[in-house]
Image (cartoon, grey):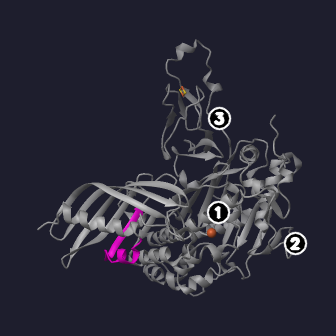
Amino acid sequence: MSITLNEAIEMITLEADMLDHGDFKEWLSLYTPNGIYVVPIDPDTEEFEKTLNYAYDNAEMREKRVERLLSGRAISAAPPAKTVRLQARYRMLESNAESCTLRCAQMLTELRQGRERYYSANVTFRLVRTDGVLKIDRKIVRLLTSTEALTAVSYIL
Amino acid sequence: MDILPDPTTLVNEDSADGSIYSNPDLFDMEMDRIFMHNWIWVAHRSDLPESGNYITTFIGQHPVIVSRDRKGEVHVMLNRCRHRGATVCEHKKGKAASFVCPYHGWAYGLDGALRGVPFQEGYTGQLDKSNYPLISLRVEEYNGLIFASFDHDIMSLDAWLGRTKPWIDLFMKQGAGWPIKTMGEHKFTFPGNWKIQLENTTDAYHFPIVHKSFLDSVDSETQNTFDFVEGNGYVEDLGHGHSVMVMIPDLVDLDENLEAPIPERFQELADELAKDYPDEQVRRIVRAVGGSGFNLNLFPNLACSMAFFRVLRPLAVMETEIRHVAIGMDGGPELANEMRLRLHEHFQGPMGFGTPDDSEAWDRVQRGSLAGRDISILLNRGLGHEAQREDGNLFSDVSAETGMRAAYRQWLVDMTGKTVRAENGE
Ligand code: FES
Ligand SMILES: [Fe+2]
C-alpha cells in the first residue's frame, strides 16, 4: 500500500517537534544513512552538489552540526536559539509503497537574546520506508528569503 | 545647530573611542568621505563574462548597475533614472540590450546613454537626450577585481592598490592555472557597525577562541594548520588602509611546495583527479582547493580572505550586510570546484560552522560598546614588537592589531579630508 498522507505528516511532525525541543541526537536517527539535509540558496536548482547552499549535510555533517549545537563551544549556540515551527499546507506529490515525496509550508519563529526572527519556507521531504519505518531520505528547505540577506541561523531549519 | 563630530578626537594610533560604532553623524560622514571618495570594489570580472551582462549592487548606500557593453567595456552607473529618479533595474543580474525605466519608459544603453524617450514631442525640443545619460562612475580593474569611484580626482586604482598588487596576484593563484570565477555567495546582515567587520578580517587573535566549534569539526591535521596564533605568520601594513594577515606562511604561494604531502582530507579528491591529470597538476589543483594562507584586506569594503571574497556594505550605523562570495576555477575540474563549495559551506554563511560565531561576537561588540561614555576600544596588540620592513611596511606578529591600525589611519586621513590626491604625486 502507498504511504498515506497521514503517515507522512506524522513522520515530519515528529521531526519538527524534535528540532524545536532540542532532541538533536534523536533527530539524527530519523534519516537514512545516505540521507541529505539541504538548505539551498538558488530557488530553482535541483543540482545541490554543484551549487552553493546554506547547508548541504550528509550523515557526517549532520552529526557535526548536532555536536556543534550541543557542545556549548559555539558562542552563537550557547545557548541555542529557541524555535517554534508550524507546518501546514501539506501536499503529497507522489507516493508508492516504499517512498513518497511530500511538500509543505513551514513558518518558524526564532528567539535569541531578546530578538524574534522569522523564516518561512517551502519544505520538500522524500521519505522512504525501511523495515516498516519511515525515514527521511531528503529534506529540502527552500527559504522564502534564500536569495536575500539572512541572519545567523545557529539551529536546524 | 549641527556640529559634525571631530574624527581626530575619536581615533588614536593605539585606540579608538567606542562611539565610532554608534554615532549616526559620524556614519553619515563616513558614507560621504570614505565611500564616495575611495575606490570601492563592485564586482569580479567573472560576474560579467559577456557583453550585455550586468549586475546590480551598491556603493555605500548608492544603488548602481555594473554592465559590460557591446565593446566589452565595463560601466558602473547610478541605478537612477534621469527623469524622476526611479531605479531602472531591480534584477540582481542578467543579460540585456538596454535598461528601460518602468515608470515612463526612458531607455538607456549598456553604457548608460539615453537612447529613447516615449512621446518625446511633449518636450517641444527642450530635452536633449545627450545631456541625460545614467550617471557614470569612474571604473578601473586590477587582475579581475573591478572597482568604481564617485571621485574623479582620486589617484588611479593602480596607485591606490599599490603594495597590495603582488598579494592580489598570489590570491588569484587559487585558479590553479585557470581563471578565477565566482560561484555564488552567502549574504547576511548583523546588527552592528561596518567597522566591526572591517577589523575582523585582520584579527587572527579571535580564531582559536571564537572558532572552537569549527575546529572541533575538522580533523587533527586541519586543526594544526589552523593553529596559527603563536605560529610564524605576521600582519603587514600595505598602505592606504590595506593590510595582509599571513596565517599559514606555507600557503602564501600556491605554486610552491608542490612536493609537500597531500593533506588527508584532500586525498580522495587527489585520487579522483589523478585519473585525468598528471601528478604535478593534481598537486597544484589540490593546493588551490584548500585556499590561500592569508587574508588581504582592501580598505574599505573587500577582503580576499583565504578562499573567498568578503564584501561589506554599511546599511545603517548599526546594521551591516556581508557577502561571502565563493570562488573557483573557471574551466577547472568540477569535482575540485564542488569540494571548494563544500568547504565554503562548512565555515561560511549564516548556517556555517564559523560565521554565526563571528557574527555573535560582532553583535556583542556593538551592544557592549554602547555601555558607558569615553571608554576606548584597544588597538594596541602587537605594537610593542612592531617593526618596519626595508620597503617601509610596518609588520608585527600574526595576532597583532597592525591591520586595524592601518585601516584606522586611512579612516582618519579620509575623514579629515586629507585624502592623498593624484596631484600630490602619489
Ligand atoms: S522616472 Fe524613469 S522614465 Fe520617468
Ligand atoms: Fe572569525
Residue that label 1 marks: B364
Q: Is residue B336 left or right of residue B22?
A: left
Read off the magenta span.
Answer: A22-39
Q: Disc 3 residue type?
A: Ile
**Dot 2: chain letter:** B
**Coordinates of residue A113 in the picture (x, y in percent):** 56, 61
**Coordinates of residue B372 in the picture (x, y in percent):** 76, 57
The image quadrant that residue A59 belongs to is bottom left
Q: Nearer the viewer, mark 3 or mark 1?
A: 1
Q: Which mark is residue B216?
A: none
Q: Residue sitting at 30 percent across and 56 percent down?
A: A104
Residue that label 3 marks: B135
Q: Quadrant of ligand 2?
A: bottom right
Q: Please tell me whether mark 3 sits on a helix, a strand or a loop.
A: loop
Residue that label 2 marks: B390
Is disc 1 on the same chain as disc 3? yes
- CA gap between label 3 and label 1 equals 39 Å
The one nearer the camera, B112 or A98, is: A98
- CA gap between label 2 and label 1 equals 39 Å
Q: Residue sitting at 52 percent across and 69 percent down?
A: A77
